[in-house]
Amino acid sequence: MIGTFYGIGVGPGDPELLTMKAVKAIREVDILIAPKTEKKNGSVALDIARPYLKEDVRIVYQVFPMVKAFEKDTTAWEANKKEILGFLHEGKNVGFLTLGDAMFFSTYIYVFRLLEKEGVPIETIPGIPAFIAMGSHLGWPIVEGDDVLSVIPATADMEKIRRVAQVSDNVVLMKVYKNFPEMADLLEEEGMAGNAVMVSRCGLPDEERIDDIMARKDRPVNYLSTILARRTRA
């Protein structure tokens, strides 16, 4: 009997934002995969899910290289897939924890694609993305009326980012930690910097809100930082 693989979106940081379905899966799986980077110990996703762990669940940390290197070297990804398949073929149910939503800028997507080819049972449980939580938490409508919203990864080509921003009423800028000064300047050029807010580590104990992004643009930004911006203030 093959076990089921669950992709579990745990939301941005607040454990109370997990869905009931996510909590049920976390409490029932035999093994939880906690993805981590090579440079840091621990797992933010695991910390968020920790209040719901059962006592005998087995935690397995897996290191995933940066996605940009995926096609150049799939060794680590294949090794992680093999380990997960081993658990599933033992009849174990396996949960894969991921920040935000499982199908939104997530490492899980690549794991899902690898396992999908193996014909194993897979269930993906959605979670709340950081920018959705930010809107409610800050009292900041993300879109209304006929607004056009663009979700932009700041790691994209700068000219592409500029073209998208120019035709958008509101933007969500994600992955801004590497080039925050350039993103701040772009929003200033587009007349959005005055109507922008950045939140780092949304929903976590050390959450930080930055309202004046231009005053902050020369300081380092946390990896888990997202900007909401719009052309006009309602």
Image (cartoon, rainbow, N blue to C red):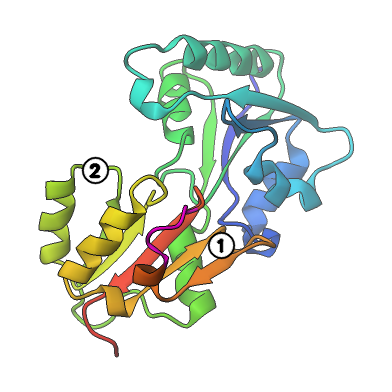
**Where is mark 2, residue-wise?**
156
- Quarter occupied by the N terminus: top right
Q: Residue at x 56, y 62 (%)?
A: 202
The location of residue 132, given as percent across then percent down, is 45, 66
Using the image, tell me which numbered label, if any, was put on residue 210.
Answer: none
Residue 172 locus on image (x, y percent)? 32, 62
Q: Is the residue 175 above or below the residue 231 in the image?
A: above
Residue situated in front as seen by the camera: 19 or 107:
107
Residue 169, magenta (yes or no): no
The Cα atoms of the two marked residues, 1 and 2, are separated by 23 Å
Residue ID at (12%, 48%): 159
Q: What residue is shown at x 40% (from left), y 43% (from top)?
A: 105
Q: Residue reaching furthest right?
A: 55
Three-letter amino acid code at disc 2? Ala
Of mark 1 and mark 2, the one earlier in the sequence is 2
Q: Secondary structure at mark 1?
A: loop
The image quadrant that residue 186 belongs to is bottom left
Residue 161, position as x, y percentages in the image: 18, 52
Q: Is residue 174 left or right of residue 88?
A: left
Q: Residues within 10 Å of mark 2 (few under 14, many from 20)?
A: few
Q: Residue at x 76, y 40 (%)?
A: 28
Q: Is residue 220 magenta?
A: yes
Which class describes the residues within 10 Å of circle 1: few (<14), some (14-19), or many (20+)? many
| Place of residue 25 in the rendered image (x, y in percent of width and height, measured from the top left) | 68, 44
- The residue segment tinted magenta is 216-221
Question: From the viewer's perspective, is residue 41 above or below residue 206?
Answer: above
Identify the residue position indicated by label 1 in the image.
202
Q: Is residue 107 above or below residue 19?
A: above
